[in-house]
Amino acid sequence: MDKLIDLHCDTIWRLMEAGENATLENNPFCVNLKEMRRADTMAQFFACFVDMQWFQEENKFEEGYQYVKKMIERLRKEVEHFSDKIAFAKSGKEIEENREEGKISAILTVEEGGILNNKIERIEELRNEGIRLMTVLWNYENCIGYPNSKNAEIMAKGLKPFGFEVIERMNDVGMLIDVSHLSDGGFWDILQTSRVPVVASHSNARALCPHPRNMTDDMIRGLGEKGGVIGVNFYPPFIRESGKATAKNIVSHIQHIANVGGMESVCIGTDFDGFIGEEGEIGKVGQINILYEELKRAKFTEKQIEKIWRGNAMRVIKEVI
Ligand SMILES: [Zn+2]
């Protein structure tokens, strides 16, 4: 096994739901400290994910913002409690320093830019709280833009004026821009606007699995040319249209993204705890060695696997945050 960087999990959401009944060390989820040690995780990105339907319609974006702060607080409590095993990282250098001390790095992210609620100064506030990546929207329209959709008209829609401001400010403060979940039109606007590489933290190839959450070959190529990375997602419906999603199927997406976007464009973004792990062959992050072995079997070299496992992600982290 090899040191892993995973660009996306929804484990904070699960911890919030479980309340006092779970900790980062002891929980039945796909990601916990035991599983991460088994996976030899170097850095795990933890999303503060909010579904706007959880909140009252009139005040949902403000309530969402407050809930994200509570999620940050929850992970902070967990990291403090298990500070011998895990520490926050806010840069590539800090990830390496934590590793030298034998600790896993936790990186905070936000999944739903709607919580900005048209307040540009919130980007800096979130960065001061430790947030280093923002998925600009989830599956609903927000102040930044429009979501991925089976409706071609929505899918073609680009960023809103505030969305362009957000991209500039994220570039200024040093926060990774995540295009997963976004409409195709919004993706192209961001690719043209951002001064630095962008990431699709948890998306796959649409050529292999025609889900609107996945990326077309043109998008993969464009993102790769700009130096960005795509974290391959383990959620079965994004891997294959039907049947159990195997590690071999995930290798096909990795192979395809590498062929189209270049070997520098592919990394890992499991999406664990955003879905029930048992739906696929790799049920928990500690079982990710199944994918590692499958990559070797598919004749990826050690150097290539190192890039997929952490090198590509680390390059973009160091360049942007
Ligand atoms: Zn997501």
Image (cartoon, rainbow, N blue to C red):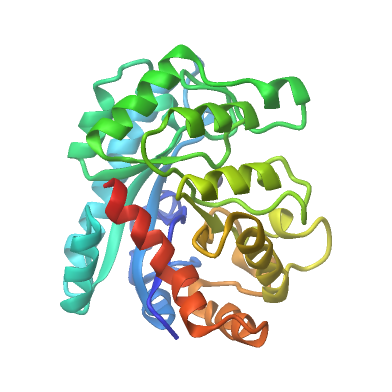
Where's residue 265, x and y in %? 52, 57
- Residue 100 drawn at (x, y percent): 18, 77
Camera-nearest residue between 223 and 9? 223
Against 168, is 33 above or below?
Answer: below
Residue 253 visible, this angle = yes
Where does the image place residue 315, in percent across and percent down from the top left? 35, 59
Q: Residue furthest front?
A: 225
Quadrant of the picture in which ligand 1 is shown: top right
The residue furthest right is 242
Left or right of 203 on screen, residue 69: left
Q: Is residue 21 visible?
A: no
Which residue is located at x 30 percent, y 46 percent? 320
Where residue 140 sits in the image (x, y, percent)? Answer: 58, 27
- Between 249 and 88, the one nearer to me in the picture: 249
Q: Is residue 100 above or below residue 126?
A: below
Q: Closer to the camera, 321 or 239? A: 321
Give residue 34's quadrant in the image: bottom left
Q: Residue at x 40, y 48 (%)?
A: 47
On screen, residue 1 versus residue 171, left or right, reads: right
Of residue 82 and residue 296, the one placed in the foreground of this image is 296
* 7 w.r.t. 288: above or below: above
